[in-house]
């Protein structure tokens, strides 16, 4: 495969020096456009795109010359050449926007090395910008499959909180897409150009999570062979997503609270305070209120995290989204597995919508991938679905909970069925469930349960009875 030739503009007023540097660049297979001054160089840049500029400071305006060149060639790397007795001008050029500087006349080997470095950096920046744009397109609010009123409410909340700086607590069952909500907030916010860093608190041992969050200095503990930046430091000006926040140990909870309040921390073994601007989005499928009561989670941290709360509904409460999610996943999975796209019959599609999905969106995607790669046909039929799904019926939802059903799912379904049986009468439902009315109302809000109350019949005969 042919290697693309890099085009350079060389600004050098001294003809002999210009020819000498140009010959060196031509030997390294660069295409060189020579210019005697900045005005001529800008003319060359306007005629065709170039990959870098090499400029002698002797031929630029000593006051703001590099800045003017940078304003006209924003994304092009600039390497400046300065005389040995004017190194301070090279340092000043870096402040004005140059990428690097070296002494004039340049050593051919060093010139080759410096050019290669700034060109590689430019290519890396271009690739990062491209991938950042692709991530923004993938994870902004338009990535949601929204048909159900429940998810429209989530999307509306995402759009309202995205521009803010407040911490956000995302709640919901395992597999509902809490990280997708966090990414949508980040990529719909002014922080979208900066990092989104995710950390699963349940996957990190308690003795290591502090180092993961705040970093450590070399020699701070056994095995600390070098300085390591923590997730907070890496997420500076971006977003730090703390998944399974309920599993964080109490000691780290206290340190996290301080960072949220003071916006500063120290690395383990360090003695310098590091200021940080990172928005924190936390997620949990646990009942943090119950953990606060059980003294397993700090109350002050809980209230600090839930400045804004987003409750992501389970898939069975957003059934209108299942069809759109199925189509999207089938297309994505077909590309990822290099297989032909497959359709799905209406009967199979309606069965997927009827199933109660204890594993939520994650379970739906895994089932579709399994069916896609194991089904030789071009259409997914009812008989291609796993037996526990294909044999499900509307009555199954109210039957015995299947394997993998969590206590929270069972509690929510029991509350919903009890409310349906009492026609939405919360006092009666609380009495049947043997819990307080305030506890019931809190759980209804947490689970996002909506039951329309029965319409009361007009009491037309009450007057006759009392007369």
Image (spheres, rainbow, N blue to C red):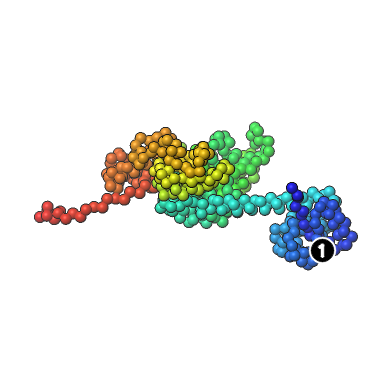
146 or 112, which lies in front?
146
Q: Is residue 334 above or below residue 206?
A: below
Q: Is residue 23 above or below residue 303?
A: below
Reading the image, the residue beneath label 1 is 35
Does residue 412 show up? yes
Horizontal side of 425 relative to 40 (left or right) equals left
Q: Position of residue 438 (x, y in %)?
A: 33, 45
Extreme left residue here? 467
267 or 120, which lies in front?
120
Does residue 366 show up? no
Extreme top residue here? 222
Q: Position of residue 144 (x, y in %)?
A: 49, 51
| Quadrant containing the C terminus in the rendered view | bottom left
| Residue at the (81%, 52%) spot, across then down | 29
Mark 1 packing: few (<14 Cα in 10 Å), some, or many (20+)?
many
| Residue at the (71%, 53%) spot, across then down | 122
| Residue at the (61%, 52%) spot, across then down | 132
239 or 393, which lies in front?
393
Callout count? 1
Horizontal side of 125 relative to 306 (left or right) equals right
Q: Position of residue 213 (x, y in %)?
A: 58, 42
| Residue at the (63%, 40%) spot, across then down | 216
Extreme front residue here? 377
Name the secondary structure under disc 1. Answer: strand
């Amino acid at each position: 495969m042919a290697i693309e030739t890099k085009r350079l503009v060389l600004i050098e007023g001294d003809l002999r020096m210009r020819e000498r540097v140009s010959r060196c660049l031509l030997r390294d297979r660069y295409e060189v456009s020579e210019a005697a001054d900045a005005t001529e160089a800008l003319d060359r840049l306007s005629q065709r795109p170039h990959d870098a500029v090499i400029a002698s400071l002797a031929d630029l305006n000593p006051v703001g010359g590099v800045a003017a060149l940078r304003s006209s060639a924003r994304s092009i790397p600039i390497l400046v050449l300065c005389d040995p007795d004017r190194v301070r001008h090279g340092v000043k050029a870096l402040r004005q926007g140059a990428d690097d500087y070296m002494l004039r006349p340049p050593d051919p080997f060093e010139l080759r090395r410096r050019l290669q470095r700034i060109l590689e950096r430019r290519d890396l920046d271009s690739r990062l910008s491209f991938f950042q744009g692709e991530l923004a397109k993938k994870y902004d609010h338009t990535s949601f499959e929204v048909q159900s009123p429940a998810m429209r409410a989530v999307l509306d909340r995402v759009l309202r909180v995205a521009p803010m700086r407040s911490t956000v607590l995302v709640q919901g069952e395992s597999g509902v897409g809490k990280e997708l909500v966090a990414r949508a907030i980040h990529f719909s916010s002014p922080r979208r150009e900066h990092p989104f860093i995710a950390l699963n608190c349940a996957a990190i041992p308690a003795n290591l999570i502090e180092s993961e969050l705040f970093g450590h200095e070399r020699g701070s503990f056994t095995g600390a062979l070098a300085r390591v930046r923590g997730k907070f430091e890496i997420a500076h000006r971006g977003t730090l997503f703390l998944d399974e926040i309920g599993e964080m140990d109490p000691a780290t909870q206290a340190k996290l609270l301080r960072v949220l309040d003071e916006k500063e921390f120290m690395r383990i073994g360090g003695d310098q305070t590091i200021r940080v601007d990172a928005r924190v989005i936390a997620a949990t499928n646990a009942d943090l209120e119950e953990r606060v009561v059980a003294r397993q989670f700090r109350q002050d941290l809980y209230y600090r995290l839930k400045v804004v709360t987003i409750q992501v509904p389970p898939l069975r409460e957003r059934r209108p989204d299942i069809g759109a999610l199925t189509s999207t996943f089938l297309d994505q999975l077909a590309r990822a597995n290099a297989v032909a796209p497959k359709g799905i019959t209406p009967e199979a599609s309606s069965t997927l919508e009827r199933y109660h999905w204890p594993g939520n969106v994650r379970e739906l995607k895994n089932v579709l991938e399994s069916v896609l790669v194991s089904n030789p046909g071009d259409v997914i039929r009812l008989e291609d679905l796993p037996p526990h799904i294909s044999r499900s019926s509307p009555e199954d939802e109210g039957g015995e909970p299947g394997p993998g059903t969590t206590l929270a799912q069972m509690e929510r379904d029991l509350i919903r069925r009890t409310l349906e049986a009492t026609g939405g009468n919360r006092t009666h439902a609380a009495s049947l469930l043997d819990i307080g009315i305030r506890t019931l109302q809190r759980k209804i809000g947490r689970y996002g349960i909506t039951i329309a109350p029965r319409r009361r019949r007009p009491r037309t005969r009450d007057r006759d009875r009392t007369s």
